[in-house]
Amino acid sequence: MRIFDRGGLCRQDSFQQPYFSFWSARLNENLRYHRKLWEFVFIAQALWERGFCVPGKRGLGFGVGREPLTAMFASEGVAVTATDLAADGRVELGWEATNQHASGKEALRNPEICPDALFHRNVEFLPCDMNAISQDLTGYDFCWSACALEHLGSIEKGLAFIERSIDCLAPGGWAVHTTEFNISSNDETVDNEGTVLFRRRDIEALMQKLSDQGHDVAEMDWSWGGGPLNNI
């Protein structure tokens, strides 16, 4: 039985489940109510359930920053290509000053998650503009991004990235992406800014488009739960 047989929203009750404690420890993260941690756990659990956290698989990470997922996948024997914006782009967008982007492979090393020898054997780092993905990035078993696609300049560009990321996959591969989401309106939102907010209608339109193209698209659970933290 899959916990994440569908996509979903960050909810308070997720943090209270055994799998959440497991992945928090596995990712060397303190267990806390934080959206970013939920994204890491969702991606890890979803890909583990689909059989991708095993030796011999190939994973491609977009906009990885300094997140722990690269080291975790590498520790499971996955050959990981980790990508992030080139240095000039990071400075232009202000990411360099906040230390949120990876300048290379060393920035992703985390010995408490993955021994150095295994990390260096399984991880490569490449600069990549998510709005202009190289045609050479193909044949991966899975790809992921965590809270990155809302920074691509517009809703249209973020959705185009998701669609383009699928071209990087081998047949049967899975793309797992998380982003910020507008729960207050399906009409008014933030667009054409440094950070945009996707609406339900934006995601549903993309799901329909991908389904029409013959892709297997996971259904979405749009509920955000009844816990007090869900209403902050």
Image (cartoon, rainbow, N blue to C red):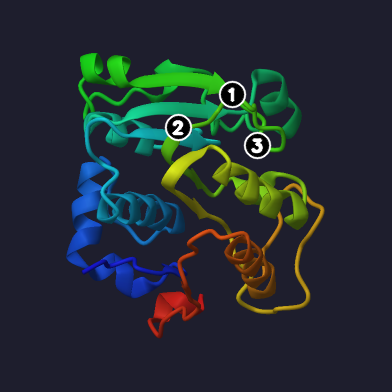
Q: CA distance from mark 1 to mark 2?
A: 24 Å
Indicate the position of residue 128 as horizontal and vertical percent values: 62, 27
**x 51%, y 75%: residue:** 232
Q: Amino acid at mark 1?
A: Asp
Disc 1 element = loop
The circle drawn on residue 130 is 3
- Residue ranking furthest to the right: 192
Q: CA distance from mark 3 to mark 2?
A: 17 Å
Of the two numbered discs 3 and 2 on the same chain, state the one appearing first in sequence.
2
Indicate the position of residue 129 as horizontal and vertical percent values: 67, 30
The circle drawn on residue 66 is 2
Q: Quadrant of residue 141?
A: top left
Q: Amino acid at mark 3?
A: Met
Question: Quick one: 19 or 159, which is closer to the camera?
Answer: 159
Of the two numbered discs 1 and 3 on the same chain, state the one appearing first in sequence.
3
Callout in the foreground (1, 2): 1
**In-image side of 116 versus 61 (left or right):** left
**In-image side of 80 versus 223 (left or right):** left
Q: Which residue is mark 1?
A: 136
Callout in the foreground (3, 2): 3
Disc 2 element = loop
Q: CA distance from mark 1 to mark 3?
A: 14 Å
Label 3, residues with CA under 10 Å away: few <14, some 14-19, many ≥20: many
Callout in the foreground (1, 3): 1
Question: Quick one: 200 or 16, which is closer to the camera?
Answer: 200
Q: Amino acid at mark 2?
A: Arg
**x 50%, y 78%: residue:** 222
Label 1, residues with CA under 10 Å away: few <14, some 14-19, many ≥20: few
